[in-house]
Image: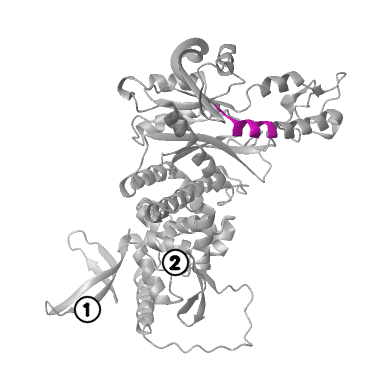
Amino acid sequence: MYLKKSHNKKTGKTYLSIAQGYWDKERGHTRTDVVEKIGYLHDLVKIYDDPITHFQAIVDEMNAMAAAEDAEYNISANKNKRLEKNTSKLKNYGYIIIMKILHELTLDRLLINRQRKTGIECNTASIMKLLVISRILSPGSKRKAYNEKQRYFDFEKDTFTLTDVYRSLSWFNTLAEDIKLHLHKRINKVYGRNTQITYYDVTNYYFEIDKEDDLRKKGYGKDGKRSPLVQMGLAMDADGLPISYELFPGNESEKLHLRPMVLDLVHNYETGRVIIVADSAQNTGNNIYYLDKGKQRYVFSQSIRGGSAGFKKFVADESGYEWLSDEYKRKSRNERRKISVDFTAQGKTVKRDMFVDQRQIVFYSEKYAVRAREKRNEALAKAAKIVSSPAAYTKATAYGALKYIKDIEFDKDTGEVICAEKMPYLDLDAVAEEEKYDGYYCIVTNIFNDGKDRGKFPDDKIIEIYRGLWQIEDSFKVTKSDLDARPVYLSRDDRIKAHFLTCFISLVVIRLIQKLVRDKTGVDYSPENLVKAMNNISCINESNNLFQFYYRSDLTDHLGEAFGLDFTFERLTRAEIKKNLGDSKKG
């Protein structure tokens, strides 16, 4: 192998690649194959002090290792030899799957092309790869990712510093919208997108640093605690692959952010007409009116207990229900519904009543009823303790039980109970009213099973579409547990936003891995199990350039099958590992 320098006389540019010469017996002359493309010299000098010397050293190392490929390995060991401090001989090889996805998404090309126009000297594409790989396989702080970079073969000789990592975050943030759109287009081209159904939901992330700014605002998290939060609205396609996301302050209503997301998806992501699926938080007059007028479809859940008297009467009326089993019944109706919509005129917001046609599907499940009773009984037990000792609780610690308590007040600043003349007591009327609707669930939509859609959307199909929303809830769970997106330790807004960008890219990658394994093998592995398997595909430097592997399972075999890789060898040389990693970058 040799470092090939191809000079274009017309442009004056020199392109570097690693090539392999060999004798072609059939043609009777020497031929050259390009082993790995590197890039244009004038771009590489911005990243490396001396690109030719740098890559010549890599070629020399590859040749030395190749020469030893067929040699017999005689392993000798000194059993009394001690490990040096801060040493880890364990190296991960499973990250080759992540690298393969990242290169198929051509994220490195985007970053390298954009970096040409800046004065940034470090290899930002390499930094992004490290942050994504680390976020998936060993989540933690940026410092932790940097300190563990020697764990991966690709980063052994990278010279970027921890300071470079933090500075790159600021730059990544400026490219966030371009990166999201680039990933969407590549997924559409390479893997295929199904955006006919788009799921949307919102969650929040808390911070260890108790500080507010333009992005971090105090709000109530999903656990009821009031702390600095940032909220994320996430859009996902019908296959469970993330499309895009939006960050907004923790004190803003999530109801305001569905419309901008839909506008972005339709116009910038060119999704066309979609079915927006979301929970009851997005079921507002403004959102319904916007989607109706924009000829977009929606499937929302509808609060029964918060519905109108006429709607509650429809739910409770036994007539019209079709029992599909001993524990499940369902009915539906088309209804002209009055909604309240905000209009802006002369700088003022005016509410107007509007009417929309809507399909309402109600179903009852005994399983849901049992779950509702169990959940309420837990909350009632907590409410009883609060009533007996109100001073022992704050608004945060009383979360989940307050709707069953009357005459209890809290200090707005401290959250502590205000001692008033009235004593708190259990609201038994509220309990009785809630019990009426245990097990009932309602979905509303502007998709009707008539006209052009006749026969395409029966009630069960709409219910099935809505149930797909669990995938986006599962994605939030993945970001918070498997990817450790929270708590966030960064303090600068631009770097916080870049942190969530790397989390989003990591979520895209892990979902693609999950999809490709499922499509190839028919087995649907959880992100947690996929991450464990990739971490277990690790090796130890046994002797010189020989590495020993110690783990194999059905899952690792399925990963290999899905990605055209072989994880069955007990030993590989460094040259073999490097070659395989090089091949993974040809996506």
Q: Which residue is painted at 86% across and 31% down in the image?
A: 389
Q: Amino acid at mark 2?
A: Asp
* One can see residue 230 in this view: yes
> What residue would you read off at disc 2?
154
Q: Considering only order in the chain, which callout, 2 or 1, is on the residue closer to the N terminus?
A: 1
> What residue would you read off at disc 1?
22
380, 400: nearer the viewer? 380
The local secondary structure at tag 2 comes to: helix
Quadrant in which residue 569 is drawn: bottom left
Q: Which residue is painted at 48% across and 34% down in the image?
A: 200
Q: Which residues are magenta?
A: 364-374
The local secondary structure at tag 1 comes to: strand
Q: Which quarter of the rendering shows the N terminus?
A: bottom left
Report the magenta stretch's main SS: helix
Q: Amino acid at mark 1?
A: Tyr
330, 130: nearer the viewer? 330
